[in-house]
Image: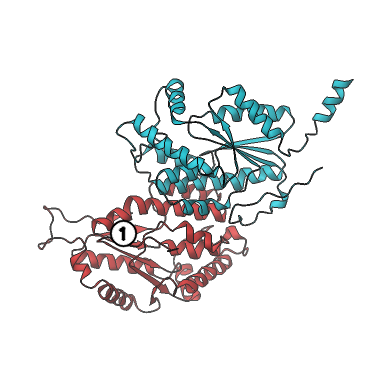
Chain colours: A cyan, B red
Amino acid sequence: MVKHPPLQFYNEPLPGVDTSELQGKLIVIEGPDAVGRSTQIMLLRQWLEQEGHAVLDTGMARSALAGKGIKMAKEGNTLGPITMTLFYTTDFADRLENEIIPALRAGFVVLIDRYIFSIMARAVARGEDRKWIEQVAGFALVPHAVFYLRTDVEHLVQRVVLGRGAFDYWESGMDLRFGPDMYESFVKYQTRLIKALDSMVQPYHFSVIDAGQPIPQIFRELQKRITRLPLERSPRRAPRARRAKA
Amino acid sequence: MPLFVPNRHRGKLIVVEGIDGSGKSTQISLLSHWLRSQGYAVAFSEWNSSPLVKQTTRRGKKKEMFTPTTFSLIHATDFADRMESYILPLVKSGAIVCADRYAYTAFARDVARGVARRWVRNLYRFAMHPDLRFYFRVSLDVALGRILGGRDALKYYEAGLDLGLARDVEESFRIFQGRILDEYEAMAEEMGFHIIDATLSIEEQQGRMREVVLKTFGPSLKNGVLRLPAGGELHGQTPAATVL
């Protein structure tokens, strides 16, 4: 069995976590709204499970602690940008401590639909201090890989209009009204989001994938890159291979 | 790096800090009534009271879901909402905002819970720097005597039971409050606290607070702060006491 160096925290370690116990793999899919992340997560999960890996997938606002509170806060009209950033960070911390780290301890492959980078990008796009949020989110574990599904705003608009048929209030940054209507606000806000994510590619070692390609091609690209990661060989794989030979 | 954002507005921000049982809530309440009686626009903000966040906090406490990190973050979220939607706009408009507990509570309590000092300090960097910071100094025994004497059972997180410091609730509370007290004392000078001897009589403490307020603000209180016109009524309305 190959030994890998233990996972690390970006900045401030979480109290009470021994990273040498974390045997699983941490894989993150990042990208702007409506870029197709969840489709890829679903495909990856099926594939990884067929390969014999135990998989946990998780994403924003799904924590037991804060998920409901965030949804309720977003229904009102008083959620401020810093409050939103911290509410999502609370949600992330709860999932990290109570879902992600226990799954990593148990040797799971953890697939995360948006990590701290989306929280950070949204904060930066809303004019908050980048250093501040980087330090606040510094208790996050450094993932084994961050795949950034990258595209331009025109493509996002196409996907939103053709796919969902309407613009979403928060995805359009309407809390800060970047434009006179949802379309213009969406374009300005998502441009800022993409710019913020782009600026993280180098410092956070994102692996960039062109999200303008068809779904199967993106999936194959992800598979190729994940296969190159030092994933543990699954126990089920060997017997199956023997059977195939016989 | 500055700790907080400086207050460049017309209004004022006054905060009180101290361990449970130090009497700070009584004092800030008296002070805000006095300021209101002088005709100033006064608003009041309490720790852990954001309408957007407090339900999440309450649920998390009831179900004992918190770790030191999430406990710290949810209180910062609550604080951020009150800062963005309430404290900042009111201070900008020229009101005096009185806050019962402020970021210093997190600095003391979260660090006592094992969260890194540097991290908590950064977490609250968006907060407005208060114009006045009163710290009610009291010994652990006096504070415990006041608390354990006259109220309901101690709560799980309040007693620091999540930290496994002691089996006995009161013993755990004593150890935890002791740690918080040490943190307050260690930051008192750095943070420029006005220290009030919380063993003095209520009237004496209040007298000192008022002295400090008048001395610190001086004429800026009369010139900058929003005040009722002479006669005491505003378009036939008596001023509402806002509380968040």
Residue A246, image x, y percentages: 90, 20
Residue at image x 33%, y 67%? Answer: B131
Q: Is residue A85 left or right of residue A13?
A: left
Q: Quadrant of residue B215?
A: bottom left
Residue A104, image x, y percentages: 68, 43
Q: Quadrant of residue A41?
A: top right
Structural crowding at the residue carrying mark 1, measured as other residues with C-alpha within 10 Å and reported as few (<14), some (14–19) or many (≥20)? many
Q: Nearer the viewer, residue B204 or A148?
A: A148
- In this orientation, does residue B153 appear? no
Q: Which residue ends up furthest to the left in the rendered image?
A: B231
Residue B6, image x, y percentages: 35, 62
Position above or below: B117 against A113: below
Residue at image x 18%, y 64%? Answer: B39
Amino acid, disc 1: Phe
Q: Which residue is mark 1?
A: B44
Q: Is residue A34 left or right of residue B89?
A: right
Position above or below: B144 against A62: below
